[in-house]
């Protein structure tokens, strides 16, 4: 006679391979609870609560302003990128709210940025303003490249002149017609092999 | 197991010290048995370090949470493949990983290098062993740097691996970058060995050339997979953020690329010996500098390990290595005189020199930008931030100059180019660039940088296509070969050259992809199930996103909230994109980290449709998304594959000696075709 316990065991045996396979492959095991259509079964799984978006959240000028300032959480991202990327950050949403508040007050992007620089220091800017010592930051790489290019051009010209001088003085002594032909051939082969 | 690991570390440390002593303090040149002992010590160190690695992995796989490292970076429910990558997820494990791989590379350098370099090999072993000793010393004597450190108690479960590291890209990206960094030690060791042995002919270059190309491939793969990981895992829709640690991986790649170009001049003309030596030393130092930045915490970075004294070990090592290497270079300066001189400003040599200038210039500007916050703080006492706007402003023009030179270099003859030669060589590539520029402009593309980038991309592709076509055509004419046979033989007989051209195509793909990113469309929306939002793509298509709802379930080591969006392009069904929030838990079901985001993606050659589920307001099924349209992103990954294929082709050993029947002699062989069979060396 089959007892209820046997029936459960039988069901277990039948279901076990599928269950193990699902576990091996990392397949989803649905959780009941979404019957309540408008609420998540477990809101905390979905991360921090999001504020309701407004049109200003996507305003190009607000975004451009936020892109010029760094989030103060230490992530090295700008405010806009941080608030739309790192959804665990509490700093960038707060900074965003401040930007929006200043915007609503009628401040221009420059005035908003000046406000934050006055409060947080120059470090809040994603790139230092090109003034004072910061000019060196922008100019030095270009200057180094320019100096390098001019130096390289001068060096090549000097070497070229030296080679030409050596060729002029050495040619009558060292080169026979056969050698010259061989040298031309060698150069041609060099060019071809390059 | 920790005892075995500690013992193995100490054994490797002592053998390394002993062998370095033999290599640098004895006259092994007169005592073959000493030279052999130094070389064999590399194998002994390798074995000892492999035992140490086995001990750590054994601890990780056995869930021995009494080992502090295992408890910090793993948990019982961490999938097994991430148990493998947990080895290098933290500071301590990555130090051991570095030492082990260096031990393996040091052994391979001894085993695979021809015995004709026997004058160099004991020095090479001494140098690699000494560097291994440094890494082991950091682990043994650094503050909280020993991977076998035990806790005073055994926690029931570990902290688990950071969710952002639980990505296939992170299984591959760090080891690839490490392999790139670590393998740079071998070219450096050969360079120093050549100077110590005063064997400064082309021998050391030949001995280390393939190692240099291999390092370059590893660095390229590591950087590209890092971009892929950042794109998929960080959820910002970008690939490169000019973060100091990203920059640190870029520095040695740039200088190594410069070296791979300039070394051709040394091989062919016996020139630039001092410069090449400087580049090899500089590249190695930059790899150590990158490690210092990552591990010291002196510069803020999302990638950094926590601030620790370990960084200062690297700073000291960097300084000592720089002083010793450049002092040695100074003492050998006269022995590194060039064997030939430049003959013309308009020559391949000059083009390579300007290419070197651009590469090293970009490396300098990136380094300058990375260090400028520290410099500024030292000079003005004010902290500043140097972020992407700075790097883009400074480096985009330099990058375009480099792209231009990529197209120019192959077109100019060695030694001296004539006006006729220049006309003949440039006409097709310039036309290709102008046509690309004109067509894109006519199609409505605007903006100086995008148009210049794509125009120059057309120019470079024109150059590469012309090089291949002329070579193939000439072979077909000379040997009567079929087009595919001609192509195959052309490439196989000069793998470095044509491998290099393929690499150039890969670089073009990167530039194209970067141009695409400039046209990114991004919008934040909140939707209820059934609602549709439309985003206009940069190509003018309407991409409609219909939110289907969020499901929640448990899977492996995480609790998942998966939001599904049905996507159409101009009304045609495209895909269902799922983006997730994942709350990772330990084996007791306790949350381990804050919920992380998994990007949802539909990708094709034209554009990526990229969805980030940001979460929900008020715990409802109403969801917030970042919807991003990213044109041409796939070309990064295609470029990466092309780059690697070109690199592998360039370093592939040997070449088949195919006997071919010559049809008839020709007066002028095409560019890139041997006048006699077999004249072109691989």
Image (tube, coloured by chain):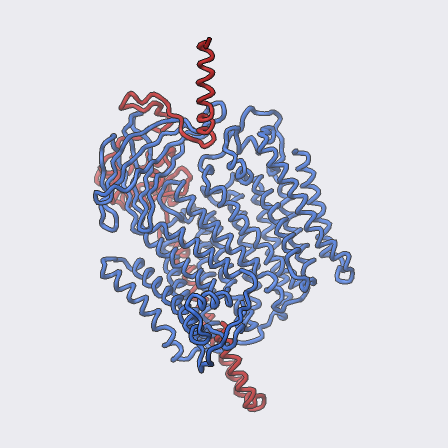
- Displayed quadrant of residue B38: bottom right
Question: What residue is drawn where x is 36% and y is 77%?
Answer: B423
Colour of chain B in the rendered structure image? blue
How many numbered callouts? 0
Question: What residue is drawn where x is 58% and y is 75%?
Answer: B339
Where B587 falls versus A112 (above or below)? above
Task: Give left or right: position of B620 versus B265.
Answer: left
Pick the front one: B301 or B583: B583
- Displayed quadrant of residue B655: bottom right
* Residue A146 position in % (x across, y down): 42, 66
Colour of chain A in the rendered structure image? red
Task: Give left or right: position of B424 versus B307.
Answer: left
Which part of the image, by quadrant, shows the N terminus of chain B? top right
* Residue B28 position in % (x across, y down): 75, 59
Can residue A102 be seen here?
A: no
* Residue B471 position in % (x across, y down): 43, 71
Pick the front one: A104 or B395: B395
Question: What residue is drawn where x is 53% and y is 58%?
Answer: B213
């Amino acid at each position: 006679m089959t007892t209820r316990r046997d029936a459960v065991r039988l069901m277990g045996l039948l279901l076990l391979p599928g269950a193990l396979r699902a576990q091996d492959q990392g397949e989803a095991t649905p959780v009941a609870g979404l019957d309540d259509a408008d609420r998540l079964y477990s809101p905390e799984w979905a991360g921090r609560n999001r504020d309701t978006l407004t049109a200003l959240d996507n305003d190009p000028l607000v975004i451009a302003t936020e892109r010029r300032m760094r989030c103060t959480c230490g992530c090295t991202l700008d405010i806009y990128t941080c608030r739309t990327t790192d959804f665990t950050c509490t700093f960038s949403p707060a900074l965003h709210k401040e930007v929006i508040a200043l915007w609503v007050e009628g401040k221009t992007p420059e005035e908003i940025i000046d406000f934050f620089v006055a409060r947080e220091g120059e470090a809040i800017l994603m790139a230092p303003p090109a003034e004072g010592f910061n000019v060196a930051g922008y100019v030095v790489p270009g200057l180094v490249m320019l100096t390098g290019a001019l130096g390289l051009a001068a060096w090549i010209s000097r070497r070229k002149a030296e080679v030409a001088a050596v060729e002029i003085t050495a040619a009558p002594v060292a080169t026979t017609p056969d050698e010259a032909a061989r040298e031309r051939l060698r150069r041609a082969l060099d060019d071809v092999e390059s | 197991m920790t005892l075995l690991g500690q013992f193995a570390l100490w054994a490797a440390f002592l053998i390394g010290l002993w062998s370095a002593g033999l290599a640098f303090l004895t006259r092994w040149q007169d005592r073959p048995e000493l030279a052999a002992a130094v070389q064999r010590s590399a194998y002994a160190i390798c074995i000892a370090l492999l035992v140490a690695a086995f001990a750590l992995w054994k601890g990780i796989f056995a869930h021995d949470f009494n080992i502090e490292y295992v408890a910090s970076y793993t948990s019982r429910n961490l999938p097994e493949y991430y148990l493998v990558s947990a080895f290098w997820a933290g500071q301590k494990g990555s130090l051991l990983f570095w030492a082990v791989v260096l031990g393996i590379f040091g052994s391979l350098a001894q085993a695979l290098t021809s015995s004709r370099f026997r004058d160099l090999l004991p020095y090479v072993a001494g140098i690699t062993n000494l560097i291994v000793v440094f890494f082991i010393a950091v682990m043994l004597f650094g503050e909280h740097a020993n991977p076998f450190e035990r806790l005073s108690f055994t926690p029931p479960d570990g902290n688990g691996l950071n969710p952002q590291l639980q990505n296939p890209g992170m299984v591959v990206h760090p080891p690839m970058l490490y392999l790139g960094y670590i393998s740079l030690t071998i070219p450096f060791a050969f360079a120093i060995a050549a100077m110590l042995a005063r064997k400064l002919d082309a021998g050391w270059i030949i001995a280390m050339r393939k190692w240099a190309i291999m390092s370059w491939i590893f660095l390229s793969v590591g950087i590209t997979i890092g971009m892929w990981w950042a794109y998929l895992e960080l959820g910002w829709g970008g690939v490169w953020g000019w973060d100091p640690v990203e920059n640190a991986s870029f520095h040695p790649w740039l200088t190594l690329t410069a070296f791979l170009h300039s070394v051709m001049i040394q091989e062919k003309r016996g020139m630039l010996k001092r410069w090449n030596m400087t580049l090899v030393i500089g590249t190695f130092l930059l790899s150590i500098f990158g490690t210092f930045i990552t591990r010291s915490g002196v510069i803020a970075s999302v990638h950094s390990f926590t601030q620790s004294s370990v960084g200062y070990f690297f700073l000291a090592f960097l300084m000592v290595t720089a002083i010793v290497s450049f002092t040695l270079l100074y003492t050998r300066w006269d022995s590194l005189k060039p064997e030939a001189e430049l003959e013309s400003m308009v020559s391949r040599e000059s083009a390579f020199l300007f290419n070197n200038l651009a590469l090293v210039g970009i490396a300098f500007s990136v380094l300058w930008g990375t260090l400028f916050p520290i410099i500024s703080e030292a000079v003005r006492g004010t902290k500043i931030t140097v972020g992407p706007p700075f790097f883009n402003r400074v480096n985009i023009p330099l990058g375009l100059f480099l792209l231009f030179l990529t197209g120019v270099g192959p077109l100019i003859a060695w030694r001296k180019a004539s006006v006729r030669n220049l006309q003949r060589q440039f006409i097709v590539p310039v036309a290709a660039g102008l046509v690309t520029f004109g067509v894109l402009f006519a199609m409505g593309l605007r903006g100086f940088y995008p148009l210049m980038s794509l125009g120059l991309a057309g120019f470079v592709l024109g150059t590469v296509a012309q090089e291949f076509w002329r070579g193939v055509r000439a072979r077909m004419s000379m040997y009567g070969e079929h087009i595919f046979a001609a192509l195959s033989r052309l490439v196989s007989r000069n793998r470095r050259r044509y491998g290099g051209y393929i690499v150039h195509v890969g670089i073009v793909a990167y530039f194209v992809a970067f141009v695409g990113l400039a046209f990114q469309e991004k919008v934040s929306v909140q939707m209820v199930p059934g609602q549709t939002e439309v985003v206009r793509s940069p190509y003018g298509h309407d991409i409609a996103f219909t939110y289907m709802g969020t499901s929640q379930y448990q899977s492996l080591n995480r609790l998942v909230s998966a939001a599904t969006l049905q996507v159409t392009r101009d009304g045609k069904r495209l895909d269902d994109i799922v983006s997730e929030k994942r709350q990772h838990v330990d084996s007791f079901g306790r949350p381990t980290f804050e919920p992380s985001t998994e990007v949802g993606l539909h990708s094709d050659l034209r554009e990526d449709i990229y969805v980030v589920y940001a979460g929900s307001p008020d715990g409802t099924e109403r969801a917030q998304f970042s919807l991003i349209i990213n044109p041409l992103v796939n070309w990064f990954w295609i470029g990466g594959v092309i780059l690697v294929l070109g690199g592998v082709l360039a370093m592939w050993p040997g070449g088949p000696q195919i006997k071919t029947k010559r049809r008839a002699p020709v007066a002028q062989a095409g560019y890139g075709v041997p006048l006699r069979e077999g004249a072109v060396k691989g």
